[in-house]
Image (tube, rainbow, N blue to C red):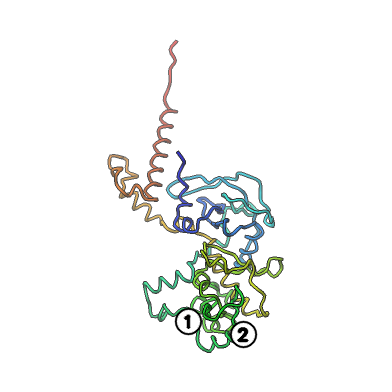
């Protein structure tokens, strides 16, 4: 019988993104820092270094990775132990799928600064939540991607019939879209210093440098942060297109790198904002404890009769709650404690050998 996958793989985020690589904080309990689907997005330690340093800027600290074993220490609670040699921060060797710890040079038990940034949904998911729960601040959430006629005219004049990614395309197959929809300035540029450095505010995003002509089949995927462009001016892989989720037939419209275009520092700022948002939506965080608070766990344990001295109060095993992710975790914890108590009882017994 094959053991079921650990619950961090079964979290809705990790399951949806089909992650196969998990990087944990050197804390107790440990927290998931990154989860990656390397079938789509291969990574190296050096790549993670560049991405996290670019996002965190002055709050970033040097680190190294190490293969680890993840141990269950309670209900949805884990600890890690090193299980291999250090992986240097600047290593460009492919990182095999598996479990890793994020360690600092000085022996500190703390999470990297990137963990302090909340995981963000994709632009499309945020829009969907506003459609389901409209409020006066967003206006009409169906129009968050609308590009005004003045900006559209300037983009058409600049881009002609060239899709940002697929090149010359029949006009009927293209539309104009934002790189970072103006409403999402607060998530694409999440800190005050970041916004000041980029000179960003919602009104300043309504500029032709923040809008492009794109194939209609790519626009919903781009707005859903399913793919983006990695700007690496110091490397040899600049403007590489990274794919984070399955794209279906639209995958054939994307080259490996974004085609060259006239230099525009402001456009690069918006493109970098889209890329950072895509990393946050698809790779960073996603710990299962983000889905199950301590109160939720305690309440479920009480409802199932766990934690009481008299286990006669346990809910019957045909109760459907035992079959949920949380219910299965709670039952496994019950069994671990029973085994531990049985072992203690066994070790304390006195055995007398007959002469």
Q: Residue 8's spot in the image, x, y percent? A: 48, 52
Q: Residue at x 64, y 57 (%)?
A: 44
Q: Residue 249's spot in the image, x, y percent? A: 52, 65
* Mark sitting on residue 238: none
- State the quadrant of the N terminus: top left
1 or 2: tag closer to the N-terminus:
1
Question: Vertical placement of 309 versus 28: above or below?
Answer: above
The residue singled out by tag 1 in the image is 146
Question: Vertical placement of 116 versus 306: above or below?
Answer: below
Secondary element under disc 2, as helix, strand or loop, is helix
Mark 1 and mark 2 in contact? Answer it, CB < 8 Å.
no
Q: Which residue is drawn at 51% across and 77% down?
A: 181
Q: Residue 17's spot in the image, x, y percent? A: 50, 59
- State the quadrant of the C terminus: top left
* Mark sitting on residue 158: 2
Pick the front one: 271 or 29: 271
Q: Residue 295's spot in the image, x, y percent? A: 37, 56
Pick the front one: 232 or 313: 232
Q: What is the distance, in whole Å, between disc 1 and disc 2 at their CAs?
A: 19 Å
Q: Which of marks 1 and 2 is in front?
A: 2
Q: Which residue is drawn at 62% across and 80% down?
A: 266
């Amino acid at each position: 019988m094959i053991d079921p996958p650990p619950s961090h793989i079964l979290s809705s985020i990790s399951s949806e993104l089909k992650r196969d690589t998990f990087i944990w904080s050197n804390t107790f309990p440990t927290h998931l820092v990154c989860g990656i689907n390397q079938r789509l997005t291969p990574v190296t330690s050096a790549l993670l270094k560049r991405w996290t340093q670019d996002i965190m800027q002055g709050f970033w600290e040097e680190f190294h990775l190490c293969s680890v074993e993840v141990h269950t220490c309670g209900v949805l609670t884990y600890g890690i132990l090193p299980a291999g040699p250090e992986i240097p921060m600047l290593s460009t060797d492919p990182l095999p799928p598996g479990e890793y710890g994020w360690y600092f040079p000085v022996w500190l038990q703390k999470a990297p600064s990137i963990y302090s940034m909340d995981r963000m949904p994709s632009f499309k998911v945020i829009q969907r939540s506003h459609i389901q729960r409209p409020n006066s601040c967003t206006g009409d959430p169906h129009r968050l991607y609308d590009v005004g006629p003045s900006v559209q005219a300037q983009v058409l004049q600049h881009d002609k019939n060239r899709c940002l990614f697929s090149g010359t395309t029949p006009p009927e197959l293209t539309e104009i879209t934002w790189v970072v929809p103006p409403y999402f300035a607060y998530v694409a540029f999440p800190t005050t210093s970041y916004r000041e450095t980029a000179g960003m505010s919602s009104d300043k995003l309504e500029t032709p440098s923040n809008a492009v002509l794109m194939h209609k089949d790519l626009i919903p995927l781009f707005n859903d942060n399913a793919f983006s462009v990695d700007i690496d001016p110091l490397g040899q892989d600049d403007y590489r297109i990274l794919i984070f989720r399955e794209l279906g037939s639209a995958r054939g419209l994307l080259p490996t790198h974004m085609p060259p275009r006239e230099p525009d520092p402001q456009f690069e700022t918006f493109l970098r904002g889209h890329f950072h948002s895509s990393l946050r939506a698809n790779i960073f965080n996603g710990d299962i404890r983000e889905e199950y608070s301590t109160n939720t766990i305690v309440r479920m344990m009480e409802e199932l009769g766990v934690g009481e001295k008299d286990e006669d109060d346990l809910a019957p095993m045909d109760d459907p709650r035992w079959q949920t992710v949380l219910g299965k975790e709670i039952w496994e914890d019950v069994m671990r404690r029973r085994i531990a108590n049985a072992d203690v009882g066994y070790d304390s017994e006195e055995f007398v050998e007959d002469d």
